[in-house]
Amino acid sequence: MNIGHKRWIVADGYIPAGSTGSGRELVSHDALCILNCGHRDARIELKLYFSDRKPAGPYRFTVEAERTRHLRFNDFADPEPVPHNTDYASVIDADVPVIVQHTRLDSRQPALALMTTIAYPA
Amino acid sequence: MNIGHKRWIVADGYIPAGSTGSGRELVSHDALCILNCGHRDARIELKLYFSDRKPAGPYRFTVEAERTRHLRFNDFADPEPVPHNTDYASVIDADVPVIVQHTRLDSRQPALALMTTIAYPA
Amino acid sequence: MNIGHKRWIVADGYIPAGSTGSGRELVSHDALCILNCGHRDARIELKLYFSDRKPAGPYRFTVEAERTRHLRFNDFADPEPVPHNTDYASVIDADVPVIVQHTRLDSRQPALALMTTIAYPA
Amino acid sequence: MNIGHKRWIVADGYIPAGSTGSGRELVSHDALCILNCGHRDARIELKLYFSDRKPAGPYRFTVEAERTRHLRFNDFADPEPVPHNTDYASVIDADVPVIVQHTRLDSRQPALALMTTIAYPA
């Protein structure tokens, strides 16, 4: 199955600066959930846009064939970490079709909040 | 009315491991809400993708003509249960057009969180 | 401006049975937000689907030209009220193009939860 | 990269009247997150629709080339502020393609709620 698009956009990027609760599961995070249904590994390039500076990236990673990866912007380090408490947006480019869903968990206050949307396929 | 698509994708699958509150209504869950507006029953096949193992499935179920079913991944048992606290993604295939919406309720902390999105029609 | 579609679907309908907080604003509800950008009033017909009974409706209402209406399923009474704590789905038919967004507020536990998605345009 | 659409709609507009927590980050707000991937600044015009009065606007602002702006309806002042605790909807027109995501943070009760959706591209 070769399903999806090669380019996706998430316009609302934001990593909440702070968390309540314990464990990696409850840490506030902004995430890309990428599914590669196909039989070839997907090489992904991510570019980040900000309100007051030049774009950052590319961030590069692979989503293997017939696998999903749920990637936290919090974890990206190369070429530079993603600042917290800062507005950004992202463009995801893949060399094969994939599907992208954007999810945020915010546990700054003592009961977490969630939001999700299928990203915009361009 | 024959409305929708025969294939849908949800890239962010996750069953929170734990709940607060009482009753089935408040149990943390990840759900597919499927509407079959047509006059023929819809036979559905679901395939699950993971980050580090081969896909699971197919999970099979029926959504009767002119009915909706809100199915929890928590309840799927055959061919195997869906692990909690584990990233996954799903591809939904129907033999007639249906509409799919993805919703999660997370009550790990003592005030539930919700998220929803229309799934990606492929 | 004549923008949108004449048919929209929301597959996840659910009115949480219970609320915390005071005032209509904080009552748990499931809502359709409909925008009519055009210069003609929109006559809307709504049909509800359930898991274990025949569809209900049509529910009829008007969204005036160049107006928005945020309608709660909780408030629908004719031809019959919408049951709480019950899974349903809805098909919205308009005689002119409109835009529909689905939003739920759930205040069963003492800190409200929100979810939203643009409905599925058919 | 010239990505997106020139017109977007958000049917569910609402600024919660009240907040808990401290700091601008936790103030209840309704926001448009706009990404301009292109090499020309985007001039944006926003028109607001209400349930019981004529539309308001245009609100005008710019999203610079290769930048994102996360704009709160709370902050709009010209030609008039956006009322709180009031249903509205918005149509966003840009002179170059952009991508729009709609997000609300609601901290009326003492644990914030979030919701998001990619806006409707018209």
Image (tube, coloured by chain):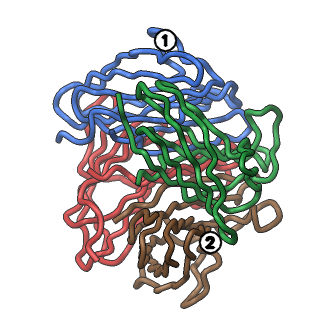
Chain colours: A red, B brown, C green, D blue
What percent of the width, then of the height, locates residue C12? 59, 58
User: Where is mark 1, residue-wise?
Assistant: D77
User: Is residue D42 rendered to the left or right of residue C35?
Assistant: left
Compared with D94, B24 (above or below) is: below
Q: Residues within 10 Å of mark 2 (few under 14, many from 20)?
A: some
Q: Nearer the viewer, residue D118 or A41?
A: D118
The quarter of the picture where residue D95 lies is top left
Q: Secondary structure at mark 2?
A: strand
Q: Are marks 1 and 2 on the same chain?
A: no
Q: Quadrant of residue D91?
A: top left
Q: Chain of mark 1?
A: D
Q: Position of residue A110 (x, y in %)?
A: 71, 46
Residue drawn 31% across and 33% down? D7
Looking at the rendered structure, the kind of residue marked 1 is Ala
Q: Secondary structure at mark 1?
A: loop
Number of numbered discs visible in the structure rendering: 2
Looking at this rendering, what residue extends furthest in the top direction?
Answer: D79
In x, y percent, where is residue A41? 25, 74
Inspect this view and state whether residue B67 appears.
Answer: yes
Q: What residue is at 56 percent from the left and 38 percent from the top?
A: C33
Contact check, label 1 and label 2, Cβ < 8 Å: no
Q: Is residue A110 visible?
A: no
Q: Residues within 10 Å of mark 1 (few under 14, many from 20)?
A: few
Q: Residue at x 62, y 21 (%)?
A: D84
Identify residue type, mark 2: Arg
Chain at tag 2: B
Q: Which residue is mark 2?
A: B72
Name the residue nearer the viewer: A92 or C2. C2
